[in-house]
Amino acid sequence: MGVRFGLFGTGFWAAETHGAALAAHPGATLAGVWGRDTAKAEELARVLGTRPYADVDALLADVDAVAIALPPDVQGDLALRAARAGRHLLLDKPLALTVEAADAIVTETRDRGLASVVFFTSRFSESVNDFLRRAADDGGWDGVRATLFASIFQPGNPYGASPWRRERGGLWDVGPHVLSVVLPVLGPVEEVTAVRGPRDSVHVLTRHRDGAVGSLSVTLDAAPESGAFSVDLYGEHGWRSVPGGDRSAVEAYGSAVDRLLAQIADGPGDPCDVRFGREVVAVLAAAESSADSGRAVRTAEATGTGPVAWE
């Protein structure tokens, strides 16, 4: 029997990515499914060949680790609850919707010596990670220009009915994907300026600790003809484009499971652990605050309240 996982969530992403990868992974045992809709939990458990749970604490009691595929505000509460129960965390992006909620998860995870992974899809493809390592080693980057224009509210899109995505928009849904490949190269963000644009877009300028500047534009409601995903570094080496991932979502999630299992065996610490997830949340929160206030906003890292360190 592998590490016992409880799956929290019953939507499309939970079923088609989290659940499918966990059910197929040789080192994991999918012990059960919990969802806010008990009928959906029962149906997904049937499809995945596992057991539905009506009570969160009952599922936590029966597992070693949790996989959460729920809106970030719900995930934040459940992740903290799971960490307090001593369960390892395999979470989705964004980690939470506030820096305070993310800090609580980081602190609890550190204090209990728990393994953690936050799933940024492309960061679990080796082609992307190899590129990021080379780019970080090369240095000399003046900045990045990134655009992620999705169009999820078209008929038939499985994410278009998601209330939290309609409420929080592209900044919180696809913004983490951009930041997940920018921060490892340009380093921590200290100041953010953001404005809102047409079609619920958000346009963000980031000033990084070493002086580089990022220009990031995101939306979930782009005109279908204008969809785009590009992240381009520029500097002493000219322009370099961050590649797309070389794995399907299910394959990438399987790699995330591998990396969580490695930490369970050898001790916590991963490039995409909850500390990194918290760093991403800090930039998103600063961008939202800037867009709302019309002012530049310094991040938590810049004000000396960055993520706690492992001891």
Image (spheres, rainbow, N blue to C red):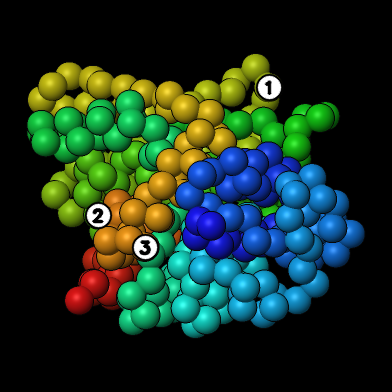
Residues under numbered marks 1 and 3 in contact, where contact means CB atoms less than 8 Å apart: no
Residue 252 spot, x, y in % from top left: 48, 37
Which of pointers 1 and 2 lies earlier in the amino acid sequence?
2
Residue 137 spot, x, y in % from top left: 11, 36
What's the mark number on residue 188? 2
Q: Amino acid at mark 1?
A: Pro
Give 3 or 145, whichever is nearer the viewer: 3
Residue 121 spot, x, y in % from top left: 48, 39
Residue where numbered disc 3 is placed:
264
Mark 3, Cα crowd under 10 Å, few <14 / some 14-19 / many 20+, is some
Which of pointers 1 and 3 lies earlier in the amino acid sequence?
1
Q: Is residue 120 visible?
A: no
Q: Is residue 52 visible?
A: yes
Say which quarter of the image contains residue 122.
top left
Give 265 or 133, whichever is nearer the viewer: 265
Which of pointers 3 and 2 lies earlier in the amino acid sequence?
2
Say which quarter of the image contains residue 304.
bottom left
Q: Residue at x 67, y 80 (%)?
A: 57
| 142 versus 83 height, above or below | above
Give 272 or 89, whichever is nearer the viewer: 89
Q: Amino acid at mark 2?
A: Pro
Q: CA distance from mark 1 to mark 3?
A: 43 Å
Q: CA distance from mark 1 to mark 2?
A: 33 Å
| 5 versus 17 height, above or below | below
Q: Amino acid at mark 3?
A: Ile
Residue 43 spot, x, y in % from top left: 85, 52
Residue where numbered disc 1 is placed:
224
Say which quarter of the image contains residue 164.
bottom right
